[in-house]
Amino acid sequence: MSDNTVKVWDPFVRFFHWTLVAAFFIAYVTEDDLLGVHVWAGYWITGLLLMRLVWGFIGSRYARFSDFVHRPGEVMQYLKEELAGRARRYLGHNPAGGAMIIMLLVSLSVTVLSGLVVYGGEECAGPLAGWLCSGDKWMGEAGEEVHEFFANFTLVLVGVHVLGVVLASRLHGENLVAAMWHGRKASDRT
């Protein structure tokens, strides 16, 4: 790395990002066939989400929600400017990236919670089994519909996220994937 770079993504943010990618992929592809692996990947996602929630308040500057959560109007304005090829470069997450983070965190949280309902209601296992394991399986079945919808919705969000990363990388002439790997971005462009 050259001298004109600055550390943007701290080690926790990078660990969180890439571990979440792996855990979600594992959970998604093991859906029906390897329940034990699927469940453990879901527990990993749960732990990661809880840690990221805390880190969003006490973490480094660019990891904090206060740095990248913007009003909807600002997000829409940024998207218009990005599509026109004249969006401002942000050292941390841009407004669209910040909105995507929030949508992914919410969608993954609903996926995890509904997964726990399914696991407790249909498999009589997990932390909710004591409340949901009964003769009537309607809670588990309803949870399964929600779980499947939000798992697929999360996958769609991931696709939009990757597209946004590619567009922003091209627009600003920087490799955002590499930056999320090593944590540094050029400081001479703000």
Image (tube, rainbow, N blue to C red):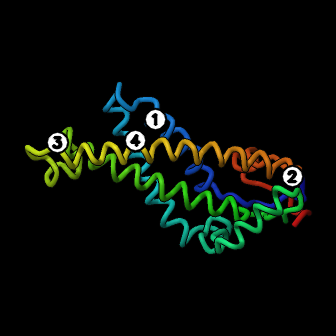
Chain-order first, disc 3 or disc 1: 1
Chain-order first, disc 1 or disc 4: 1
Residue neighbourhood size for the residue with mark 2, other residues' Cα within 10 Å, grouped as few (<14), some (14–19), many (≥20)? some
Chain-order first, disc 4 or disc 2: 4
Residue neighbourhood size for the residue with mark 4, other residues' Cα within 10 Å, grouped as few (<14), some (14–19), many (≥20)? some
What is the CA distance from the residue labelled 2 to the residue labelled 3? 50 Å
Q: Is residue 144 left or right of residue 45?
A: left
Where disc 2 sits, the SS reads helix
Which residue corresponds to mark 3?
A: 124
Q: Is residue 154 left or right of residue 4?
A: left
Report if the CB atoms under discs 2 and 3 are less than 8 Å apart.
Answer: no
Which residue corresponds to mark 1?
A: 28
User: Is residue 112 shown above or below 41?
Assistant: below
Where disc 4 sits, the SS reads helix
Residue neighbourhood size for the residue with mark 1, other residues' Cα within 10 Å, grouped as few (<14), some (14–19), many (≥20)? some
Say which amino acid is labelled 4: Glu
Image quarter for residue 172?
Answer: bottom right
List x then y, in percent, for residue 154. 52, 46
Tell me the quarter of the image containing the C terminus: bottom right
Q: Nearer the viewer, residue 68 or 60?
A: 68
User: Is residue 59 shown above or below 162?
Assistant: below
Chain-order first, disc 3 or disc 4: 3
Q: Nearer the viewer, mark 3 or mark 4?
A: 4
Which residue corresponds to mark 2?
A: 171
Q: Is residue 101 left or right of residue 172?
A: left
Residue neighbourhood size for the residue with mark 3, other residues' Cα within 10 Å, grouped as few (<14), some (14–19), many (≥20)? some
User: Is residue 58 shown above or below 151?
Assistant: below
Q: Which residue occupies 20% across, 38% down?
A: 123
Say which amino acid is labelled 2: Leu
Chain-order first, disc 2 or disc 1: 1
